[in-house]
Image: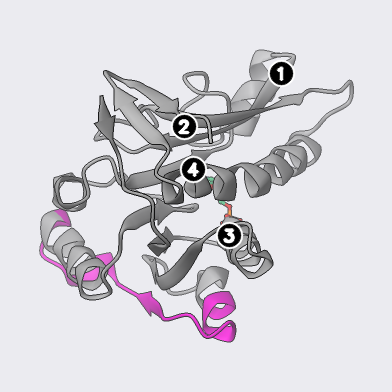
Amino acid sequence: MIKIIEAKALELGILVSGRGSNFEALHEAILRGDLKANIALLISDNEKALALSKAAAKGIKAIYINPKKYQNKTAYEEEILAYLQSYNIDLVVLAGYMRILGPSVLEAYPHRVLNIHPSLLPSFPGLEAQKQALDYGVKYSGCTVHLVDEGLDSGPIIKQAVVELREGDDLESLSLRILEQEHKSYWQAIQYMAEGRVFLQGRKIIVAEK
Ligand code: GRF
C-alpha cells in the first residue's frame, strides 16, 4: 500500500481551459478553512479562459501557456512542469483542463495529479459526459474525483457523488446539479490528501478514517 502524500498544507497547481468554477470552489473552501491548501499557481492552455481573470482578481498567479508555441506536446508539458516545480507544487489539480496529460508531468508527480469528471466513472469517460448519460437513459449519474493516469478518465477513484436524474432533465439542468456536487466533492478529496489519509492499493484508493 502506497501513501500518496504525507499530511501537510498542500501547495496546489491548477490546470484549466475554461470557466473555472471548480477552481473558484476550491478557492472558497480554502478561504472557509475547510481545505488546508494554497493555490500557488493556475495555468491555462486557453488565453480566453475565464479562469485566468478569476484567478488574477483573487491575487493568484495565473499564466497562459500557448501549446502552439512549442514544437511538440512534450516540450509544451515540460514548460508546464518547470512552472509547477518552480512554485513547489505538491499536487496538480486538473479543473476543466481539456487535454490528456502526457508522461512528463505524470512521472514528475506520481499519483499526485487529480481530475474531476462529470459522470460516475467508469461510465461515460471523455467529452460531454452529461450528454452521454442523458442519451443513454441512466437513472443516476454524478461526478468522480480520480487520480490521473495516461488513459482517458481511467485512474483510481478517490471520491464520487451521485445525482439522480429527473423526468424532463435536459443538458443544462443535469449539468448544473452535477456541477453542484463537483464543487463539494473536489475540495473534500483534496482535503483527504492534505490529511495524509489517502493510500493506493493496486488500482484502489483507500481513504483511512480520521
Ligand atoms: C467540469 O464539469 C469538470 O467536471 C470537467 O470540466 C468542467 C469544468 O468546469 N472536467 P469549470 O471550468 O470548473 O467550471
Q: Is residue 66 magenta?
A: yes
Residue 96 percent coordinates (x, y): 49, 52
What residue does disc 4 label?
192
Residue 163 percent coordinates (x, y): 74, 27
In this rendering, is residue 209 above or below 83?
above
Gap in Å between the C-alphas at discs 1 and 3? 25 Å
Say if mark 2 contacts mark 4, CB within 8 Å: yes
Residue situated in front as seen by the camera: 192 or 139: 192
Dot 4 or dot 3: first in sequence order is 3
What residue does disc 2 label?
158
From which residue to which does the magenta span run?
53-73
Gap in Å between the C-alphas at discs 2 and 4? 9 Å
Give the foreground label among 2 and 4.
4
Give the foreground label among 1 and 2.
2
Gap in Å between the C-alphas at discs 1 and 2? 19 Å
Residue type at mark 3? Answer: Leu
Q: Residue at x 75, y 14 (%)?
A: 139
Dot 2 or dot 4: first in sequence order is 2
What residue does disc 3 label?
26
In this rendering, is residue 135 above or below 22?
above
Say if mark 1 contacts mark 3, CB within 8 Å: no
**Mark 3 secondary-structure assignment:** helix
